[in-house]
Amino acid sequence: GLVGYFVIGFEVPSYHVYFSTSPQDTPTHWHQRIFFLNEPIQVVLLVVSVAITARIVQDHLISRYR
């Protein structure tokens, strides 16, 4: 099978929040994901990295995030 995990961070001007579901980090309720395969396959070490940047525009209806 294949095992996957993620590292995520949220940055706003006043604070930064990061957490990871990596097996090397503190456990969270998210855990790692295991993808079982029906047949064995040959693999080499594979590391995939994706970076996404999002901008949250504050709206008067979303006062919780101010």
Image (tube, rainbow, N blue to C red):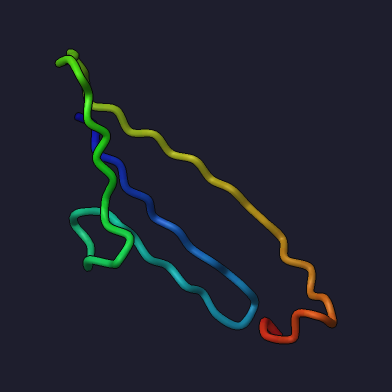
Q: Residue at 74%, 86% (x, y): give it.
A: 63
Please tell me which residue lies in front, 49 or 60.
60
Q: Which percent across, then down, holds residue 50?
A: 49, 40
Q: Residue at 51%, 74% (x, y): give it.
A: 16
Please tell me which residue lies in front, 61 or 7.
61
Q: Which percent across, then down, holds residue 17?
A: 47, 73
Q: Which percent across, then down, holds residue 56?
A: 72, 66
* Number of marks present in the image shown: 0
Q: Which percent across, then down, holds residue 35?
A: 27, 34
Is 61 above or below relative to 11?
A: below
**From the viewer's perspective, is 27 left or right of 18?**
left
**From the viewer's perspective, is 16 left or right of 63?**
left
Is 36 above or below relative to 49?
A: above
**Looking at the image, which residue sits at the far right?**
60
**Looking at the image, which residue sits at the far front?**
38
Is 41 above or below relative to 52?
A: above
Please tell me which residue lies in front, 59 or 47.
59
**From the viewer's perspective, is 44 left or right of 21?**
left
Q: Residue at 22%, 66% (x, y): give it.
A: 27
Q: Quadrant of residue 44?
A: top left
Q: Quadrant of the N terminus?
A: top left
Q: Quadrant of residue 40?
A: top left
Q: Quadrant of the C terminus?
A: bottom right
Q: Residue at 17%, 15% (x, y): give it.
A: 39
**Looking at the image, which residue sits at the far left?**
40
Q: Quadrant of residue 8?
A: bottom left
Is 38 above or below relative to 5?
A: above
